[in-house]
């Protein structure tokens, strides 16, 4: 069941996205398709994601005393930054499907997908400027960190890194937008510096927990729920956190075999099975789950210290539990 926190803001965010993307020309149609507001022929549709990040902006702003609607441009801007990153990620990863539909580059080609992503980023900053230059600056800073994280992730394709390197990448590629979500809400409410510092720590812990759960699902997720076969991230040779942890714990012979498999142009079912078996023997899944719980505990501790209603603290903790228990 979707947490109340996400349900509460969903309709308003969808309307905000619709207004922001209500433009003419082919790129506007592509952007509406990508976020899930239209089909490939431009007809209205509703195929949006969780809208988690903009909901966190609105929740934080409201709980810290912002006027209703004051944070909406910042929330929509953040979702557009997230959206542009997904368009470019799909190109770089050569992903064919997102949310059950063909990706932008598969329909309109790589050059137009790059244009669409660039256009969405520009629109994100333009939208956030309605709140003020500080909000737009935070969004630009988060986007820069996210892009750095994506670059780090791509560099891992050519080498194995240690777990600390992987976490530093996660803090940028995933964590930067979660940190931004909480801090944007605080800026819209005029919160004190100490509160903003706490919210940055909260965003970092939530980002790590969220990404590690994603990485677990990418290897051990139920294909009937995720829509992907077991070991899908391995077949794509992603050096996700469980793979990095497994490589660090493997014996010399096992590490050599793992590197040999990841060096192949394509992996077959036997390769995937061997890697999953190695991770299972090393109890990697339970180790990653333990780290997820640790980050949730850290986030919960910060949430309890925030100057917000007790009911809001409970909602925030419930949302975190939902994110790390989700199966898709």
Image (cartoon, grey):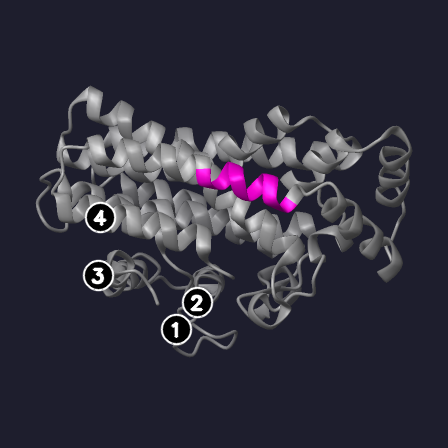
Tell me what residue is drawn at x 50 percent, y 77 percent: 41
Residue marked by disc 1: 46
Q: Is residue 105 left or right of residue 175?
A: right
Q: Secondary structure at mark 4?
A: helix
Cα–Cα span, label 2 and label 4: 30 Å
Q: Earlier in the sequence, mark 2 or mark 3?
A: 3
Which residues fall within the magenta stretch? Answer: 285-293
Residue marked by disc 2: 36
Q: Earlier in the sequence, mark 4 or mark 1?
A: 1
Which is more foreground, mark 2 or mark 4? Answer: 4
> Residue 249, image x and y in percent?
74, 31
Cα–Cα span, label 3 and label 1: 17 Å
Residue marked by disc 3: 8
Q: Quadrant of residue 64?
A: top left
Cα–Cα span, label 4 and label 3: 15 Å
Which is more foreground, mark 4 or mark 1? Answer: 4
Cα–Cα span, label 4 and label 1: 30 Å
Q: Quadrant of residue 267?
A: bottom right
Front in this rendered view, residue 108 or 252: 252
Which is more foreground, mark 3 or mark 1? Answer: 3
Graded by Cα atoms within 10 Å as few (under 14), some (14 to 19) or many (20 or more), the crowding at tag 3 reads: few
Front in this rendered view, residue 130 or 63: 63
Residue marked by disc 4: 314
């Amino acid at each position: 069941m979707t947490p109340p926190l996400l349900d509460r803001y969903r309709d308003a965010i969808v309307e905000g996205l619709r207004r922001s993307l209500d433009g003419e020309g082919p790129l506007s149609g592509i952007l509406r398709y990508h976020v899930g507001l239209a089909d490939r022929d431009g007809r209205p549709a509703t195929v949006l994601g969780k809208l988690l990040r903009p909901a966190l902006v609105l929740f934080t702003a409201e709980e810290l005393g912002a006027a209703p609607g004051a944070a909406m441009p910042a929330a929509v801007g953040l979702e557009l930054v997230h959206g542009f990153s997904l368009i470019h990620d799909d190109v770089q990863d050569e992903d064919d499907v997102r949310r059950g539909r063909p990706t932008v580059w598969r329909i309109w080609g790589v050059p137009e997908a790059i244009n669409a992503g660039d256009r969405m980023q520009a629109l994100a900053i333009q939208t956030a400027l309605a709140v003020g230059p500080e909000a737009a600056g935070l969004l630009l800073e988060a986007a820069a960190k996210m892009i750095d994280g994506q670059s780090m992730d791509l560099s891992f394709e050519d080498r194995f890194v240690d777990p600390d390197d992987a976490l530093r990448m996660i803090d940028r590629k995933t964590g930067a937008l979660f940190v931004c979500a909480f801090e944007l809400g605080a800026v819209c409410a005029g919160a004190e510096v100490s509160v903003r510092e706490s919210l940055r720590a909260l965003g970092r812990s939530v980002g790590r927990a969220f990404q590690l759960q994603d990485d677990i699902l990418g290897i051990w997720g139920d294909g009937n729920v995720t829509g992907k076969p077991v070991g899908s991230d391995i077949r794509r040779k992603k050096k996700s956190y469980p793979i990095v942890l497994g490589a660090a714990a493997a014996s010399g012979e096992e590490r050599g075999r793992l590197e040999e498999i990841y060096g192949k142009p394509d992996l077959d079912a036997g390769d995937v099975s061997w890697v999953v078996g190695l991770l299972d023997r090393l109890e990697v899944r339970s180790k990653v789950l333990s780290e997820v719980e640790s980050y949730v505990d850290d986030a919960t501790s910060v949430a309890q210290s925030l100057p917000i209603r007790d009911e809001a603290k409970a909602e925030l903790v419930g949302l975190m539990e939902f994110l790390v228990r989700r199966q898709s």
